[in-house]
Amino acid sequence: MNTVTTTPSSSAGVALHATPPDPAPSVTASGLCVGHGTQTVIDGLDWALLPGQVVGLLGRNGAGKTTLLESLLGLREPTAGTVRLFDQPVATLDDALRARIGYVPQQSDLFEWLTPAQMLGYFKSFYPRWNEAKVEGLLSKWDIARDKRIAELSGGQQQRLAIVRALAHEPDLLVLDEPVASLDPAGRRDFLRELVDQVLNRGTTVVFSTHILSDLERVAFNVAFLSAGRIAVQAPLDELLETTRRLIGPAAEVQALVQAQRMRVIGRAALDAGRLQVLARVADATTPAPQRTAAVNVEPVTLEDLFMGLTQ
Amino acid sequence: MTAHAGWQRVLLAPLQQRRNQGSRWFWPALVVVALLMLVGAALLPRVPLAWAAVTLLATLALGLWIALVSSLIVQNEPHAARLVPGHARALRRVLLVAGLVFLAVAGIVGAAFGHALPTLGATLLALLVVAWIVRMPALGMLGWIVPMLVSRASKSPAFEAMAGAASDAMLARPGWVAAGATAALLAAVAWSLPQLLQGGDVRHQRSYRARTRLRVFVRHGRVDQTRWAATGRLGCVLRELSTWPYQRVLARISAQRSGDVLGRSLVGLGPVFHWSGQLGSALVFGAIGLLLLSVVWGVGLLGAHLGGASGAVWPLSLGLMTFVVNLSVAARTALYHSRREQALLMLLPGMPRAAALNRPLAVRLLIQFVVTWALGLLACAAFVPVQARQFGWLVTLACVGLPWGALLWRDWSRLPPPSPMTAAAPVVGVMLLAACAVGLQLVFDWPVWTFALGFVWLTLALLAWRWRGVAAAPSAFPVGRRS
């Protein structure tokens, strides 16, 4: 099993590091297996997230993104394997470490019997650190009524409130499960800006699942593709787009070209009439991508192509 | 899809719904109840075996009818009714045919007892009432007031004169009157039954949503928080009053920065779960109940019943038993529905895990259960005259519910989602246990307190057995994650 780790990309669209990276990973999953009943959802997954890294977790519906994120936080017991957060076993996190974790679950209609002010006041009482100025600023900026019941807020406002709650204690690890699903484009832009600020200011490790690929492209995060219970590929997005090509042609010619260029196949689909389509990466970023031949069409890929190819 | 296939699917839906929603016990339970009716009828003196068989048939028909109609109402989803060609029509036809079959069974049952026409008439009347209560649930609220008024009014000279005139008319021309009334009822039922199934307009959407909310409330004890505004000023005032103790507790613990983390975190599970919310609801709705009762009592409607009170002990006991059992069901459903909040609470600094969470939680749940049980018992005892035997039965029947408190000591991580049987099964169980106790007492004439003590010992034994399991189980929160 290969542990997938990447260092943050210096060529990313936004510089995401204010502090030098700590060598110890913020999150480490080793041989992680998690299931629902008899069904295995996460199957021997190895993963490590470094401090200050921002990772967009991509996967098809039902691929197990939520299960993986919940398992990383110790909210689901694995059937095998281990998870460590900041080098502590997730099952026995101490209080100081828990205060460093922020989580936005998929459903944001939580604590709907409270008002935002009550909910935030309630959570504030548990944390040793609470950035009241940031809370007030975000509530005002995002136009969230403080004294209206959460049940009566719109889906987007509930989601923004959940993000405010998760950011308020200034976590070092932020886990967000589809945090922008209910947000309009303006809301998503505000959220991403806040996320980038958080990373720039504090070097927070962020992992979030999403289906909105354009958001990932805008901020040039690292992306991780979850498929068949494992991380199929993880890399900085721009590097991935730069080094990956789609090769389409007769199967034998495509395979020959892949071998000749010493490319690594990361996705494969059989087409009609003995033709083959592969997604393949060159050995490293310095190696030039192969050129189109008479038989094989070589094309650059988009994030959507990668998503379709890597999450089958 | 042919019409035949459409009918088949509509008829199969009740089976599929019950299987998919996890209530697999409905059909076996129906068969058991029908067999119990058969045995009961067969054991009665001077009852021919044919009558017992007819009882079996009637019970099965009633069960099937209830299952089918409730399924048809669920299937009558507004968008499907509006957009799927022939959907609402197929449902209406099935409903009408099922109604005719049910009436035919009622007629056979009536004929077996020699009263075909009155049985048919009574069945039609029952169908009519049920159809309109289902169509307009608010009418159901009047269901307990009308019989009471009729019962009270039946003692008045005017009502007696009216009933006498009706009786004379029936005696003078019994056939004509009975046939006419039955025909009128048949026409009313034939018109009313299809009204249960609507065509997808705005009123249908509204009533479907209301029924769904009601079903969720009955099944899961869950109130839709977004609906409070629709209850108007009075509803909002009642909500504010009933949640006032909870709000006080919330404000107090929000001001604290230290202290018992588990206790503080349980406030985050909401007023439905927390003792302060339950206390507020009990005080407000208890006060409303008392007010209504005193008004009804004041105008003399209940005077005859509660003044003598000897007959009140059984309904009160029945209510108390159901209440006690529902306490454990309500705690379970409240925990299940707050499982997403629990996920966040588990990440709070200081939140205990595993046995350190499970044991204090178990103790708190049990204390809440026992205190509520004791308060319910005291409230009921206030309505019962001080007669040792009746009070003894009240306490004993209240104790029948105590073993269900042991259900609160369980591996919460494996809690399955609530199903229609979640609330129904314990109530049936407690009724059977109570029936056994009453039967044993009648046969052996043991002192009534023996049974109360027996149930207390049973509860203690169950708790002792489950205590170890509670400690060994994984963290209780978020509940149901391993189901």
Image: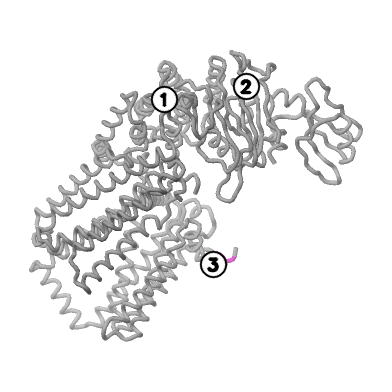
Residue at the image position 13 percent from the left and 53 percent from the top: B382
For mark 3, give the secondary structure. Answer: helix
Name the magenta segment's main secondary structure. helix
Find disc 3 in the rendering and name its residue: B8
Q: Earlier in the sequence, mark 1 or mark 2?
A: 1
Residue B275: x %, y % from top left: 28, 40
Q: Is residue B7 magenta?
A: yes
Residue A148: x %, y % from top left: 35, 29
Find disc 1 in the rendering and name its residue: A144
Residue at the image position 50 percent from the left and 37 percent from the top: A75
Q: Is residue A165 magenta?
A: no
Dot 3: within a 10 Å radius of its alpha carbon, few (fewer than 14), some, or many (20 or more) residues? few
The chain identifier of the residue carrying mark 3 reads B
Find disc 2 in the rendering and name its residue: A219
Q: Mark 1–mark 2 contact, CB under 8 Å?
A: no
Q: Amino acid at mark 2?
A: Val
